[in-house]
Image (cartoon, grey):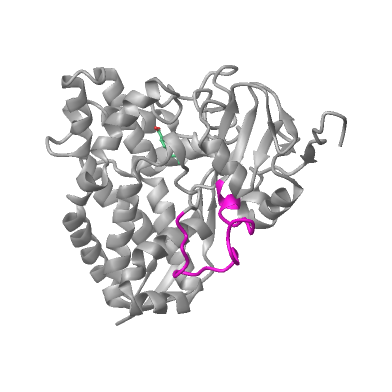
Amino acid sequence: MNMDSTVDRLVTGIDPFSHAFLSDPYPHHEAMRAAGPVVWLDHYGIWGMARHQEVRDALTDWQTYCSGAGVGLSDFRKEPPWRPPSIILEADPPLHTRTRAVLTRILSPAAINVLRETFAREAEALVDRLAERREFDGIADLAEAYPLKVFPDAVGISEEGRENLLSYGNMVFNSFGPRNDLFEKAMANAGPVRDWIMSKCSRAALAPDGLGIQIFAAVDSGELTELEAGMLVRSFLSAGIDTTVYGLGNALYCFANYPEQWAVLRENPSLIRLAFEEVLRFEAPVQTFFRTTTKAIEVGGVKLGDGEKVLLFLAAANRDPRRWDKPEIFDVKRRATGHMTFGTGIHGCVGQAVARLESEAVFGALAKRIAAFELTGEPKRRLNNTLRGLDSLPLRVTVA
Ligand code: QZP
């Protein structure tokens, strides 16, 4: 320690976007948590936080840790963003306050509850078909198929071309990392995919009874401009698919790996809500994102400069033994709320009621019909600069 009681920064050569790291991040998370409250990631010249307390503190201090310079590695003030920035995710107050208010209203738990019957009916129909097949791919046939049906239906966009939503999500979530091979591959067909997405964001493309058109109602009441409304529909289409695809896939992966936990849940279906929170804690579909400092500050005795990127390891916070009892154990009875997977603070996930509703519908339907899951082959990982999840999950089910 030197005279003014700041400590030397802890430097690590870890590349959090390498294939090795993304394939198995957990030992690296532990090393970073052990290294200190904030570590310097030499490979990119950025800070990293992996402990629950510091991640939480950063997320609840938007004045110090801003989003307007982008929530990826790229600093929008230094290099041009790959697409026009999101006016909610990549924005700070006062712009964020105005856009957020509109989506908070449209996506409130009460507003989303209206979708419950439809979501449950679709989940039961899909699970019936899969139960009849006995063997299927948990990713393509369930984790992708379900959100790709119910979410665009709820937003109010047409059936044709919905596969573009997965391609676009792949672009968005890889773009938060460096311009590595994963990013380049995701961007291979960027033009047509982006054109398709933008064509679905106009007033004319949206059904009269969906969530999308409700954003345009905020134009009529003077809260948004027509252009801003289209940009917020783009936010729905950016954030609303891959997150839930990876979340449902990770949940299936957990229940295939821990059959005794599926048995606990089947005995007591009222645990379904809590169990999904535990999945989000244990296998976080969203692993990381960034903030940018707006001034020089000190964290745990380490001095951070102004305008520096800070990578927040949400999934590492979720397994911090300083916060959680036996964090490496998947336990559906645990009080897992307080995980960082939805973020927290003013940018905390605005769509979390939709995510929870999808999971309750799917796992409610599965709990009624499926006694057990069994792997019929090795699951394959799909690497992504932000998301953790699978490319395939070969399953056989025992029907109850
Ligand atoms: C993605 C947008 C986990 C988040 C980074 C998900 C996300 C949220 C918003 C947007 C995109 O507004 O485009």
The image shows residue 324, relative to residue 148, as above or below, that is below
Inspect this view and state whether residue 24 appears: no
Residue 341, position as x, y percentages in the image: 48, 49
- Prevailing secondary structure class for the magenta stretch in the rendered image: loop
Residue range in magenta is 314-337
Q: Is residue 324 left or right of residue 372?
A: right
**Residue in the picture at 25% in, 62% down:** 123
Residue placed most toward the observer, 269 or 44: 269
Q: Is residue 109 magenta?
A: no
Inspect this view and state whether residue 357 appears: yes
Residue 292, position as x, y percentages in the image: 58, 27
Q: Is residue 321 left or right of residue 14?
A: left
Residue 370, position as x, y percentages in the image: 32, 76
* Total tally of numbered discs in the picture: 0
Residue placed most toward the observer, 165 or 67: 67
Q: Residue furthest right?
A: 2
Q: Is residue 86 left or right of residue 313?
A: left
The image shows residue 205, relative to residue 266, as above or below, that is above
Quadrant where the image shows the C terminus: bottom left
Quadrant in the picture for residue 37: top right
Residue 387, position as x, y percentages in the image: 51, 47
Quadrant where the image shows the N terminus: top right
Quadrant in the picture for residue 247: bottom left
Quadrant in the picture for residue 17: top right
Residue placed most toward the observer, 141 or 268: 268
**Residue in the picture at 59% in, 40% down:** 312
Which quadrant contains ligand 1? Answer: top left
Q: Is residue 332 magenta?
A: yes
Q: Residue furthest front?
A: 4
